[in-house]
Image (cartoon, grey):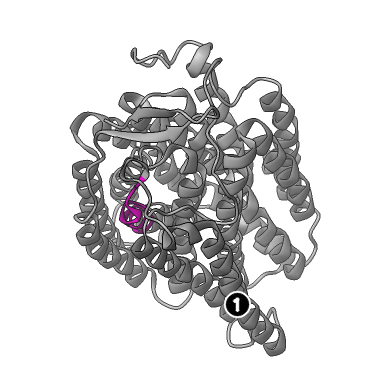
Amino acid sequence: MSTQKLKLLSFSGNTKILHLSSMAFFISFLVWFNHAPLLIMVQQSLGLTDQQIKTILILNVALTIPARIVVGMLVDKYGPKITFPLLLGISSVICFFFAIANSFEQLAVARFMLGFVGAGFVIGVRMISEWYPAKQVGLATGIYGGLGNFGAAGAAIILPTVALLFGGENGWRYAVALTGVIALAYAFVYYYSVSDTPKGSTYFKPKKSGGLEVTSKGDLYFYLLMNIPMYGALAVLSWKLSPSGVNLLSAEVVQALYIGLFVLYFYQAYHIYQVNKEIFIKAVPKIHRYKFKQVAVLDLAYMVAFGSELAVVSMLPLFFFQTFDIGAIEAGLLASGFAFMNLISRPAGGLLSDRFGRKKTLSFCIAGLAIGYYIMSQITSEWSIVLAVLASMACAFFVNAGCGAVFAVVPLIQRRLTGQIAGMTGAYGNIGALIFLTILSLVATETFFLVIAGTAVAILVAVQFMDEPKGQMAEILPDGTVQMIDVN
């Protein structure tokens, strides 16, 4: 892999892979957030209540929690070339289902299922880590993440106009269906245009599937502990859908879901033990060890960074619409500035990490994020719209740069496990989104922003326990020889 500067205007070698993967990620986010700028139209078309709209927002990020874990395992085993097209193709079908929904229940089911497409990010992280060296991986994943996440802004900018062009109360349906057509077409483009690694390179795969490999007994217990919030978040969702929430599910069904989640956790724990049981027999050689605390810290940092981004991108158009005397389209366009910052700040977070250190950059971003959300909590109708938008974009810079800083570290922990580590980290982003959106449904918007700010302060402390990546990681080639890969 070349260690020269990134040639972003090229369309060959690793730059070609970066562009193609970024577009695949952009489309996955376009599909994932195709509802956000159209919610007001959907609400008016189907006569939905505000509480039902908030429930749809929560459902949109729920399935992505387990999906990112599963997709992380699949991409490590089968490679991005197969996994990304498969994800886009399946998501396009679900997208069509959402477009033809005629009731809240149908919308809810489709939106829940569309959370699957949010796992696309994990696939590209593994692909980028295969094609770029450690000196460039922060910037490369930042560009990939920035361009891909811009799909949410693209949805906010493009889809309301598309809906208006089709016209009528069904305009939103055509706009949503169009994103499904784009995803299906690009699935074929991606499959026939990429390869998993540069020519002559080895695609390292996990020794076993079913759980993340860890390298010590203490890390195994830590890993099992870090899995609990994933099931806890899904339990919160179940409660939200119960008679105590929006009454979408009966009390008996919700009770069954609680029991199912409890059983599923121990089922997963059993498989994790099976993958790692050898550490109870003999110690892992020092050359092959990594610290799971690195993964845990990144999980928490992404929970507040990407989790808050997902939550705010989903609610900001409605917030501007209700706070200021503007129309739905204007509100969507103004709110798109939050997601638009991805183009600049995600790569900036990766570049700063490459240049000035991973831990230092992540700390800077989380601190700025906390301050940014505190300022956003002060926005009222007395503010000028310009000042409110600038405040949201300034906050978004640190939010998205923090995401870039997190994934500047993920590929540097253990190469063959990159998909699974990215999957778990990404899942925590969705845990954050689900929790923050649930809080939004219970409290005032001011309190919602303050809760995110307070969470960021606590996680800033946790980041100080992360070790700066340095030295080399070891991977075993098919012939049994060890290959050392630089991480700084």
Q: Position of residue 15 (x, y in %)?
A: 48, 17
Of residue 408 and residue 62, the one placed in the foreground of this image is: 408
Label 1: which residue? 238
Q: Position of residue 95 (x, y in %)?
A: 73, 49
Mark 1 neighbour density, 10 Å: few (under 14) some (14–19) many (20 or more): many
| Residue 168 in view, yes or no | no
Residue at x-position 57% and y-position 41%: 76
Position of residue 267 relative to residue 400, above or below, is: below
**Which region is colored magenta?**
289-301
Position of residue 75 relative to residue 39, above or below, is: above
Determine which quarter of the picture holds residue 404.
top left
| Residue 426 in view, yes or no | yes
The furthest residue to the front = 281
Q: Main secondary structure of the magenta part?
A: helix
Q: Specify whether 281 is left or right of 471.
A: right
Q: Is residue 225 magenta?
A: no
Q: Specify whether 11 is left or right of 101.
A: left
Q: Position of residue 380 (x, y in %)?
A: 31, 63
Residue at x-position 58% and y-position 82%: 245
Quadrant where the N terminus sits is top left
Q: Is residue 290 magenta?
A: yes
Quadrant where the C terminus sits is top left
